């Protein structure tokens, strides 16, 4: 069973701080990794994707990937109350088999305190 | 703007009464997905189409069916909804890699 694990939280950070969200996955051969933001009652919205080891930055967001440790993280700098949401980590486990669907973690709820 | 559209946004049905949810896309993506998401849970893949090829997840109940008449449209049919089928149903599309979600349909079963 291929799995994506996230701490459910809530993770509470003060406004302006860095929020660090973590995700582990079970298949060492996985190649592509995604972070989605989901506000309560809304659908997931793609924030970032990362394919290679290391860091990828986009505005206030940085995705970090360590394939040896099977670990992917999302850093949110200068956190704002509007960042309060559930963050879903998703992994494509099946590039070698042509499977195109993502497997999602259950998400980490982030609360940014004003 | 290119997008994924779902209708209706809210659907109320009675126990055992068939219901159809619809999804359309203007992204011209060749893959379309249906997910079920319950409160505080991960989206659960029900099935997906790669072009016309249908791929059913092993644990998707027979009560759930899907149709994709053309590239732009995909339908989710729930033949006999039970109380446990109340959830948010998410349609998504992809071309290479990332999936893009529609706004979802929230289904309530009375």
Image: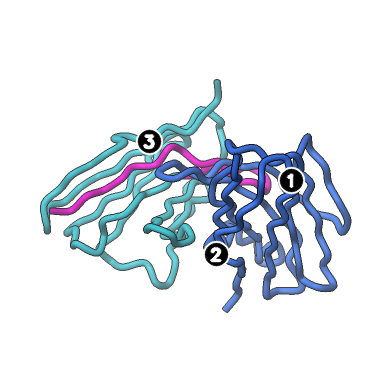
Chain colours: A blue, B cyan
> Which of the two residues, B64 or A36, is positioned nearer the viewer here?
A36
The chain letter under disc 3 is B
Report the residue marked by disc 2. Answer: A8
Residue A97: give x, y in percent of width and height.
66, 66
> Are the numbered discs 2 and 1 placed on the same chain, yes or no?
yes
Disc 2 is placed on an element classified as loop
- The numbered disc on residue A17 is 1
Label 3: which residue?
B6
Mark 1 surroundings within 10 Å by alpha-carbon count, few (fewer than 14), some (14 through 19), many (20 or more) = some
Choose mark 3 or mark 1, whichever is in front: 1
Report crowding for label 2: few under 14, some 14 to 19, many 20 or more residues within 10 A (C-alpha): some
Indicate which disc, 2 or 1, sits on the residue closer to the N terminus.
Answer: 2
Q: Residue at x 62, y 42 (%)?
A: A46
**Label 3 Cα crowd, 10 Å radius (few <14 / some 14-19 / many 20+):** many
Residue located at (52% from left, 63% from top): A106
Left or right: B44, with B76 as reference point: right
Q: Chain of mark 2?
A: A
Quarter occupied by residue A88: bottom right
């Amino acid at each position: 069973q291929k799995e994506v694990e996230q701490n459910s939280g809530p993770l509470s950070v003060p406004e302006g701080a860095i929020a660090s969200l973590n995700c582990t996955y079970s298949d060492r051969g996985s190649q592509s990794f995604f972070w989605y933001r989901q506000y309560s009652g809304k659908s997931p919205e793609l924030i970032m994707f990362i394919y290679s080891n290391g860091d990828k930055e986009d505005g206030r967001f940085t995705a970090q990937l360590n394939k040896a440790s099977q670990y992917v993280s999302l850093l949110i700098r200068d956190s704002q109350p509007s960042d309060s949401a559930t963050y879903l980590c998703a992994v494509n486990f099946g590039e070698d088999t042509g499977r195109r669907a993502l497997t999602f973690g259950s998400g980490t709820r982030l609360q940014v305190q004003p | 703007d290119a997008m994924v559209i779902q209708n209706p946004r809210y659907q109320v049905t009675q126990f055992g009464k068939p219901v159809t949810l619809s999804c359309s896309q203007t992204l011209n993506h060749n893959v379309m997905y249906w997910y079920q998401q319950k409160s505080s849970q991960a989206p659960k893949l029900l099935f997906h189409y790669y072009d016309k090829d249908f791929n059913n997840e092993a644990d998707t109940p027979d009560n759930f069916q899907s149709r994709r008449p053309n590239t732009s449209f995909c339908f989710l049919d729930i033949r006999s909804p039970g109380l446990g089928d109340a959830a948010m149903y998410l349609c998504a599309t992809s071309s290479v890699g990332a999936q893009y979600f529609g706004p979802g349909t929230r289904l309530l079963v009375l």
